[in-house]
Amino acid sequence: MQYQLVLQFNGDSLGDYDAMVALEDDLIQELGDTADIDGHDIGARETNIFIVTSEPELTFHLAKAVLDRSQLLGAVTAAYRPVAGQTFTVLWPAHRQEFSVA
């Protein structure tokens, strides 16, 4: 798996740590063997869930179903980069051009 997909939520969009863990569990179920949840980080201004995958667009397509059911699709920014790379490509929302992980 050569890409890192990041699902990023601003501030307290997820509510608390338990909500983030529940979301990760739902993502694990939805993604199955197509990708692996590779951890998370929580800071003062953002929460990130890291996913490693060979197909970031497909993985995000599958993750969107979970995010939509959880009413978090409007609160997420999704971007990916090669595992060894520095530059992210934004997948969602389409109008967003820049992305970074603090």
Image (tube, rainbow, N blue to C red):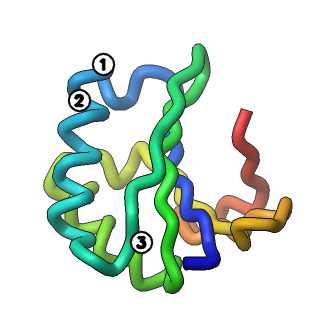
State the image quarter where residue 102 is shown. Answer: top right
Identify which residue is drawn at 56% across, 29% down.
46
Mark before the other along the chain sequence, 2 or 3: 2
Identify which residue is drawn at 25% across, 58% down.
27
Reply above or below: 10 against 33. above
Disc 3 marks a residue whose amino acid type is Phe
Numbered tag placed on residue 46 in the rendering: none
x and y, in percent, of residue 76 in the image: 45, 49
Mark before the other along the chain sequence, 3 or 1: 1
* Secondary structure category for the residue under label 1: loop
Distance from disc 2 to disc 3, alpha carbons, whole Å, reads 19 Å
The one of 12 and 47 positioned closer to us in this rendering: 47
Q: Are marks 2 and 3 in contact (CB under 8 Å)?
A: no
Look at mark 1 in the image and give the residue it sits on.
16
* Secondary structure category for the residue under label 3: helix
Disc 2 marks a residue whose amino acid type is Ala
The one of 5 and 33 positioned closer to us in this rendering: 33
Identify which residue is drawn at 55% across, 63% down.
5
Numbered tag placed on residue 19 in the rendering: 2
Relative to 64, 77 lies left or right:
right
Look at mark 3 in the image and give the residue it sits on.
60
Reply above or below: 50 against 91. above
Q: Are marks 2 and 1 in contact (CB under 8 Å)?
A: yes
